[in-house]
Amino acid sequence: MTDLVASLTPLDASTRVSVTDQVFDVLHAQVLSLALPPGAKLSEAEVSRQLGVSRQPVRDAFFRLSQLGFLVIQPQRATTVSKIHVQDVRRARFIRTAIEVEVMRLAAARFSADDFAAIEANMEAQAVAVSSGDRSTFHRLDDAFHQLICARAGVDFVWDAIRENKAHTDRVRFLSLAEGSQRAYDDHVRILAALKAGDAAASVAAMRQHLGTIETIIEQLRAENHSWFSGDEE
């Protein structure tokens, strides 16, 4: 059992959010931020004790996390945080790029002043997060930026497909934000500028370059944190 879970605090019983959802959110945040790194062991009993809940919602949260590929649950053995599978990251990046490239074509043709105002508000919040070094907030706003583009382009439904696949890339993205938040923000600035110009080709190129940066950073991150990555593609 990793002692990182000892940092968990009891849940707020007054909230209307279900206990399972609260447990899921807490653990998801710790896995995503790498407070619970790949290979860390988790115990239903210990997590339920730390959070002050019964074991059933913890078990349900574990299952949901395993469905996303974040936990490995093995009967009669410790549940562990999964390693980062490089091939899964690359597949997810390919799928996401294919979708968002088409979204950019739609956005360049459809966006109105109201659409740009909504995205600019998100960009202002991103700038604050970058300047304050708040990786967690920037990561959330980064997702919101992409989801806003989908929604404002009239294809909000595609975000469900993106979200299903991006879990494989989220930990790599978060790890890269230690030094790459400004770079990601600058990419967003270029994407927005291309959209404002109504230039579909430039918008597509900017988005493709933005999503492709994960290919250039994954090997560096893997070299620095080798034990966190799987070698299934070697």
Image (spheres, rainbow, N blue to C red):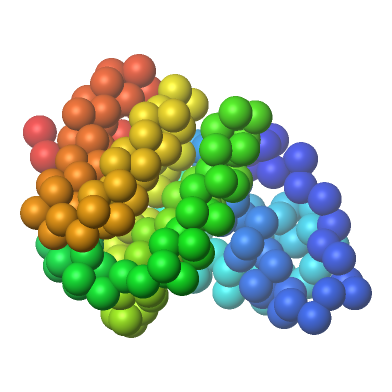
Left or right of residue 17: residue 156: left
Q: Position of residue 1 (x, y in %)?
A: 63, 42
Task: Give the image location of residue 9, x and y in percent.
Answer: 82, 50
Count of labels in the image: 0
Position of 53 relative to 85 (above/below):
below
In the rendered view, tell whether residue 227 sits above or below residue 13: above
Q: Residue furthest right?
A: 14
Residue 107 location (% of width, % of height): 25, 68
The image quarter in which residue 232 lies: top left
Residue at the limit of the structure toward the top, as seen here: 224
Quarter of the figure with the C terminus: top left
Q: Is residue 40 left or right of residue 163?
A: right
User: Can residue 105 be spotted in the picture?
Assistant: yes
Snapshot quadrant of residue 68: bottom left
Residue 114 in percent (x, y) is at 46, 71
Which of these two is toward me, 114 or 68?
A: 114
The residue at 31%/70% (across/down) is: 111
Residue at image location 46% in from the left, 59% down from the top: 119
Q: Is residue 161 visible?
A: no
Task: Judge left or right: residue 121 versus residue 213.
Answer: right
> 7 above or below 27?
above
Residue situated in front as seen by the camera: 43 or 97: 97
Residue at the (42%, 38%) spot, across then down: 185
The residue shown at (48%, 26%) is 178
* Quarter location, residue 105: bottom left
